[in-house]
Each structure stands twice: as C-alpha cells, then as structure tokens.
Image (spheres, helix red, strand yellow):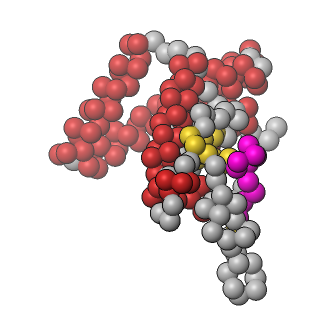
C-alpha cells in the first residue's frame, strides 16, 4: 500500500486505521502510483486519493471515493462528477467527497465502540472526572499534572495485570479481540503488555 493520509482513534489505533479509498469506473481498486524521483534510484509509491486524476498515462482517474478501514470495512461510495470537476484540481474538487468519507469512518468507529464490551457508567464517569482534574491541575502546575498522569499510568498497569492473565486463560483470541474492539494481533499485544509476558510466546 502506498503512502496516504490515514486516521486512527486513541483507543483502537491501527486496528481501525481509516483512509479515503479510490474506486475506478470498473469498480476496481487502483494500484498505488509510483512517482520517479528522477535520480534513478526510485521514488515514493502513493495511494493518496487526490493523485488519481488521470493527468498522466500511468495514473488512472478515480470514479468514486469511499472510506476504507484496516479491519476490512468499507463505506458508501461517493461518486466524482468529472464533467463538473473539469480542470479543477482533484484535491479541491473532491474535498467534499473526501470529507464525507471521513464522516462515514467516524460512524464506523462509533459502531466499533458500541460493539466492544461495555463498561459501567460509574467507571467511565470517574475516568472523565480524573481527566478533567488533570487538566485543571495543568493550569496551575504542569509538573504536578504530569506526575498525576504518570500515577494514573502506573495504576492502570498494576490494575491490568491479573485481568490480562484471566482473560488469556478464559477467552479465545477471537473473543478478546471482539470485546476490545481490536484485531487479534493488537489484542494479543495489549494483553501481553498488561500481563507482562512476551507477545511472541
């Protein structure tokens, strides 16, 4: 996959990495576009949606944009009207469709969040309050706020140790991934980090 702008959330990270995907007129996904640097040593491979304007022989023209996610989900197609686009740059003329793709992906991540194992309201409220208290503290003492954040981090690591071991014993990799809203590899790494075992065993 070539270089392109991607989006992630703090909680789900690479498990749900979103981007604007491109579809050609025949419904296929184009290959990344290779740009020769002119030095004879090659150049970058790019799959950013805005390069697919058909202006060069080796660059196909996008017929539609849609949100894509690293989990395999794809969003609604947003067609590009090339009669209306005319001589405009695709990066400008297609900006509305690209923004719609990001909105579609936002809805997708909200659905992932809803499908993850629910947390008690009292817990999420307490987390929100703690975050707000750290922000308040930062206004008067950034170092104190940093220490508070560090203590929250230490508490999380300590609190997650036995749950990680119990979850590893009691659930399958598929169940753990679904409950955490992650792919299996990321769920395995998360449990290993909190359980303090190697993710490779």
Span shown in magenta: 24-33
- Locate the C terminus and report the quarter of the image it occupies: top right
In this orientation, does residue 138 appear?
yes
Lateral position of residue 50 relative to residue 54, left or right: left
| Above or below, comparing residue 49 to residue 45 in the picture | above
> Split into 4 quadrants, where in the image is the N terminus?
bottom right
171 lies above or below 131: above
Image x and y of residue 162, in percent: 62, 22
> How far across and how far down the image is residue 137, in percent?
23, 40
* Left or right placement of residue 101 versus residue 68 in this view: left
Residue at horizontal 74%, vertical 68%? Answer: 58
Along the line of sight, the residue nearer the viewer: 30 or 191: 30
| Residue 197 visible to the viewer | no
Q: Residue at x 64, y 49 (%)?
A: 63
Asked where in the image residue 15 lies, by quadrant, the reply is top right
Q: Is residue 200 magenta?
A: no
Residue placed furthest toward the front = 83
- Up-down relation of residue 117 to residue 149 (above or below): above
> Residue 195: which quarter of the image?
top right
């Amino acid at each position: 996959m070539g270089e392109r702008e991607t989006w992630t959330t703090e909680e789900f990270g690479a498990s749900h990495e979103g981007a604007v995907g491109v579809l050609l007129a025949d419904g296929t996904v184009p290959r990344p576009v290779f740009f020769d640097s002119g030095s004879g040593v090659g150049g970058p491979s790019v799959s950013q949606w805005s390069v697919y304007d058909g202006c060069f022989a080796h660059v196909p023209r996008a017929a539609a944009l849609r949100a894509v996610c690293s989990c395999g989900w794809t969003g609604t197609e947003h067609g590009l009207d090339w009669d209306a686009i005319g001589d405009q740059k695709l990066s400008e003329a297609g900006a509305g469709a690209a923004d719609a793709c990001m909105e579609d992906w936002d809805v997708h991540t909200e659905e992932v969040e809803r499908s993850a194992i629910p947390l008690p309201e009292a817990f999420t409220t307490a987390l929100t309050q703690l975050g707000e208290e750290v922000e308040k503290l930062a206004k008067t003492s950034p170092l104190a706020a940093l220490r508070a954040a560090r203590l929250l981090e230490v508490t999380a690591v300590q609190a997650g140790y036995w749950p990680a071991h119990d979850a590893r014993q009691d659930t399958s990799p598929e169940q753990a991934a679904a409950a955490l809203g992650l792919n299996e590899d990321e769920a395995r790494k998360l449990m290993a980090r909190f359980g303090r075992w190697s993710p490779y065993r």
